[in-house]
Amino acid sequence: MIFCSDQLLRFVNLHPSGFCPAQGLLVLASAVLVTIGFEDASLAQDPTDVNRSNHVDTHFEKSVRPILVAKCYECHGSSTEQNGGLALDSLESMLQGGDSGTALRPDSLDESLIIRAVRYRDPKLQMPPDGKLSSAEIKILEDWVAAGAKVSSDFERAPNARPIKSTSLSVEQAREHWAYRPIIKPTVPASEESNPIDAWISQRSSELELVPSPLVEDRLWLRRLAIDLHGLNPTFDGLAQADKALSDRDPNALEMARLKIVDAFLESPRYGERFARHWMDVVRYAESLTLRGFILPDAWRYRNYLIDAYNRDRPFDQIIIEQIAGDLLDGQANDATSIQDRQNRWIATTFWAIGDHNYEEQDKKQLEMDAVDEQLEVMGRAFLAQTLGCARCHDHKFDPIPTADYYALAGILKSSVSMDHENVSKWIRMPLPLTHEQQEHFQTIEKKISANKKHLDTLKQQLKGANASLSIVQSSQADGIVIDDRSAKKVGSWKESNSVKSYVDEGYLHDENKDKGQKSVTFEPTSLATGSYTVRLAYAHGDNRSSKTQVRVFSADGESLVTVNQKASPPEDGLWISLGKFRFEKDGAAFVIISNEGADGHVIADAIQFLSESDTTNKKLLSEKSDDEKHESLLQSVASAEKVQKELQKQLDMQPMVQTIRAEKNPSNIPIHVRGSVHRLGEVVQRGFLSCINSHEPELEAQTRIEPHSNGRLELAKWIVAPQNPLTARVYVNRIWCHLMGQGIVTTLDNFGTTGQAPNHPELLDWLASEFVAHGWSTKWLVRTIVTSKAYRRSIFADAQAIEKDPDNGYFARSNLRRLDSESLRDSMLQSSGELRLGGSVDSTIRNGTSADYRYQHENNLRSVYMPWFRNALPPMIREFDGANPSFSISQRNRSTVATQALAMMNNPWVRDRAKALIGSIPENLNNPQDSHTPASQIEKIFQRILGRSPDASEIAWGEELLKTSSFEELAHQLFASIDFRYAP
Amino acid sequence: MMVPRRELLRSSACGFGALAAYGLLNTTSCAIADEAHGSLGKRIVGLEGLHHKAKAKRVIFLFMQGGISQVDSFDPKPILDMRDGEMIAFDDAREFANTRKLGGTHRVMKSPWAFKQYGQCGHWVSNLFPNIAQHVDQLQFVHSMHTEGVAHGPSTLFMHCGSLNTVRPSMGSWTLYGLGSENENLPGFISIAPSIGNGGFRNHGSAFLPARYQGTPLGKASQGDLRIENIEELASSDNSQTSRWQLQRQLQQIQLQRLIKNSAASDMVFPSADELESLIASYELAARMQTASPEIFNLSSESQETLNLYGIDRKETETYGKRCLLARRLCEAGVRYIQVNYGDDTANPAWDQHSNLPKHLDHATAVDRPVSGLLTDLQRRGLLDDTIVWFGSEFGRQPYAEKNGTGRDHNPGGFTVWLAGGGFKAGNSYGQTDEFGQLAIQNKVHMHDLHATILHQLGIDHERLVYRYGGRDFRLTDVYGKVVRDILV
């Protein structure tokens, strides 16, 4: 059994409640507390320890030790278990501590972890796990530590702990395991077979006396090609065409014709769509997150990148390098690459960025390391078929991967940022490289946006002002005659302010609440026609203002004192208070004095207004009207500026972005996280790679050493594709083999470790791997080589004895029954109904305005690979028929046969609609079978459209029986559900 | 794509149609599991158990999404009344996760609801749950629950799957994987009205376990309609439906037999015949599900008394009442694991009263009578003995006001769940929180422990129910969990 807890128990002497590999949780120790008496405790002493004296500390023995024995030893004893590496049965081991460091600091109560744990205040450190000690017990322990942690002499030294064993293959012995041995191209065995694949397979078959199955006829071979290379059933017309091409009787000409057909398949864009999808499973491609259904709007670029890479048959080592470090390749000196290629490098790095992280995790350190762990896990599986995650908390139990290697790799990933933190952290989006002109275009838009925003802000400010009933009034625009404080005569020191609205012009004056009776401000109009005026005072009110500000009005009738409460809001327009009506004569006394005499708070002096009779009558009407007009036009300006802003933003949104990770300015090595915990850090590890490979490849080690200032991913990429790396090419050719042959040469596609399955055909695997590399990492070469082999053309029927000898078909003497996977099933149905939309370039297919993926209704008739790949809402047919779970790296699809699939085939309206569309697209009037004279010919047509062949007699009979009670539509529907549509022999 | 044979055998079906004709294959065919079978290819019936004798056959989990406040429901703390309004230092879980600091001061907030003692056991229950309170003598309260995570997403996933961030199979999937289903016509794991938020389908997903162990959603959190996708609920007398399935079976047989005949004609055998037999069997099961489903989902056969018992006669309790009644019917039909959700699709689901704590009353009103009705109904039908009823949330709430406001923040450090039936003690309380009701301090029960204990009652040893994925054996409780024997009869 490969289980962490058992392994820990069996080999490392740790209780299962160590640190969880996945979460770094705190331990929960086992339940039952064993009460061991005082005498029993002494049995745990080491009888061989001859140096101990016989000092007995009475307090320790009476009070402290019994607590330790009863409450701690079950999990923290050297003779029981040492959870978290901690034993508490000697002073020495307490001081030495466990994973979290020393448990006891006699000089510091608060820093003694044992005290911290029993106090139960740290949610991540509470001991004993079953329940808190009594406060008396806690006190005893606290007092004991505070008094210097005195112990009896027999408690000082640690008894001999059991040695820690490890069973894993050591780094030095790594090459005892086949996968860590260098790839050496084997010599093809002599045989009459022209394809080396067949040479090896027939050699092994004859050794094992396995009778190889016969080759299938071309029609079956063609169907296999169509499904495997394009993910589509062949069409009736396509098959007929191929029949013609393969009609030649001359064997050489026939072989040539076959090669031509294979090449045609490889040249079709359908090929890239099919093979990219396989890789998308491996890199857990998705366009949304499980968490809150967040949409990843840029992921589709990565999908297109992969489809394009496969269709152009770009060398796969380049694809690997770009996925791992494309961003770091970009902008290197003398980079003469085209913009498209530069963009591709960035887009490839989406590989790292689309993990299904829980961005709302509140412990951000934990979140970051979980993200790194996910990245390492995907990378390890995808390229190396190694389960690196096992080494996060402890040395790998089976494979030669020490924890230090994990953190050497993790340091590389930690040298790039995967997210910016907020409550819900955010993944990284960056603009793609652009041509100079494009860049200028977007910069211009950005400038326009910022200018327009400024304009908009001003307008909004004004609107707000207008709404707050003219909170700032311009003296020039106000009615009557207004004298602002700036034009007033000041006595004493007055301070300007504008912190409280409303006010006239730029602000108001206040007396700083000082020197009462010594300050004044005099407002005097330059000239005033004779007449009666309403005099108003403007002030910005507030709680700290004077409630009895004295204002004196000097008019033709002398001096009048008005006391104003400036704490209260001004009654008129929120700004003014009327001081009364006064009569003034031309050149006579006409001024207003505000003083701070007798004031009980800040005195405010802002402005004085003189309103004549006519001003007053018109004022209300006028001001309201002009306010309304002003308001209206402001509203209009705001609306149009907002429209412009939206338009500009739309243009800016056209700027191509990429979801990626961001290289840190200061890359660094990171420490080992003890038992995977982000809060318990050990020794810092130099960034690097798997020592089980590098320790045997000093040259590779030297070539890929990571300099302190270097990010490290470029070195990682080079290390992965290096010819000395024995894993990468083997892992990749094995994947392609599996896609075509139904199972891998190594059946555990993503586990080449010691717990994986060793290959039955190691030489074949190595020949494929070395030739693949020699052919420039060409996937098309590899596919062509496999599908033109005899092995690919063997029947699924087999000799009974051969099945008995090789029930799992590990030696490939026969073929496996093919079944359309979810995408092929959906796409083939659309093809049959005549609705499949092919060709053209496809960008994002997510409907505009989609803010979360929940319950997304998938509507398009594009190939499945182009559908929005939503983690909470996979297209129904994909979800139902074992589509890959996009939260994981998946190497091989499940192949389940469950009733819910049957229900979907028979009842899902989508399937029904395809049948409807198919019948609708057949020109003859087939809607009423009873009227048709030759239902057999119509039955034939429908069979051809769906199964690519004509029905046999029993199927015609079946069809006629069906048509007695049902429609042609039902006939088509039933054919979609049938074996021959979904399975290929 | 071919999967290793052993895998195929595990994931395909058998027992329908003859396989004996295919020579050596008949020796393996009986090991082929059909969809009702569990991990070992055997279907556990009765109380036989997978690893030891079971006390319960099935689980009904009443999930109160968002976090019920323990100090306002089942874990009264008089000190909250005495010190209401005081600013006191607490160790806040969110604060700790964000800043790794402890001991910020918060305003103690008393419960707006009065508590009363009920039953023989005298357990205190607040006015929120006057009906559930009538059942306290049947319930096993666990007041010392604690769990992982601080936010809904991680904690909800942890409660369902035993893991915060990584994708893992849900508890119902593990259960089905271990025991198989008692019913051949219905899925063995059904989640009624699940939320799409906070992990969504992952909460009833099978992750790396074979797909047939995943939970089947029945309806949605946001709407009342309860049905299984792609089941056309037609009366069993509808001939056209029946004949459709028969026609499909005929066609499949024609095509399968042709393959077998062709292989025999060239003196060979067709080793994949069993996979296609499984396919045919899956269609037969689907047809049976379709026939059985109207019977199960049609509540109109229930008496008015029963409908009233669940509160289906009242607007405020109708929705959850129907879900609870359906749960009983599924229970009778032999469904292994039934989750009855009370929640919604938002980021602050149902019970999540960060502000306006009194809103708890709306939710309590909606579930109190239906849950009480379910307990009564299970009891009187003799179903409670071998059914585990689990009532609880992903975490609890703090005893102080959040940000000095009117609600309470999340609290993974201490909260209450209760269990009934299935060999759990009745009228019993276990564990304690501190004097304020914030942190579990005595007889602490971690979520892993609760998982282990429930599996134990189903006859499963949580340490031995494992599945190998990517070179490692996984289990629901990771490397943790202990069976809490003190709460078992």
Image (tube, rainbow, N blue to C red):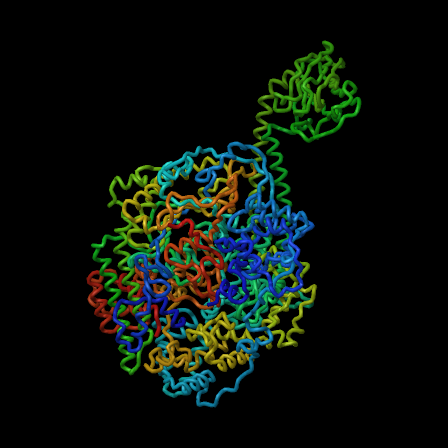
The residue lying toward the viewer, choosing from A440 and A538, is A538
Residue A654, compared with residue B141, is above or below; it is below
- Which residue ends up furthest to the front in the rendered image? A54
Residue A361, compared with residue A343, is above or below; it is above
Residue A571, x across and y down, in percent: 61, 20
Residue B57, x across and y down, in percent: 33, 54
Residue A71, x across and y down, in percent: 54, 52
The residue lying toward the viewer, choosing from B206 and A865, is B206
State the quadrant of the N terminus of chain B: bottom left
Q: Quadrant of residue B309?
A: top left
Q: Residue at x 47, y 60 (%)?
A: A886
Q: Is residue A330 left or right of residue A313?
A: right
Instruction: Residue A352: tell me if it is visible.
Output: no
The residue lying toward the viewer, choosing from B272 and B142, is B142
Q: Is residue A384 left or right of residue B321?
A: right
Residue A758, compared with residue A924, is above or below; it is below
Number of numbered discs overlaid on the protein picture: 0
Q: Residue at x 63, y 50 (%)?
A: A58
Instruction: Residue B87: tell me if it is visible.
Output: yes
Q: Is residue B128 left or right of residue A643?
A: left
Residue A547, x across and y down, in percent: 67, 19
The residue lying toward the viewer, choosing from A329 and A592, is A329
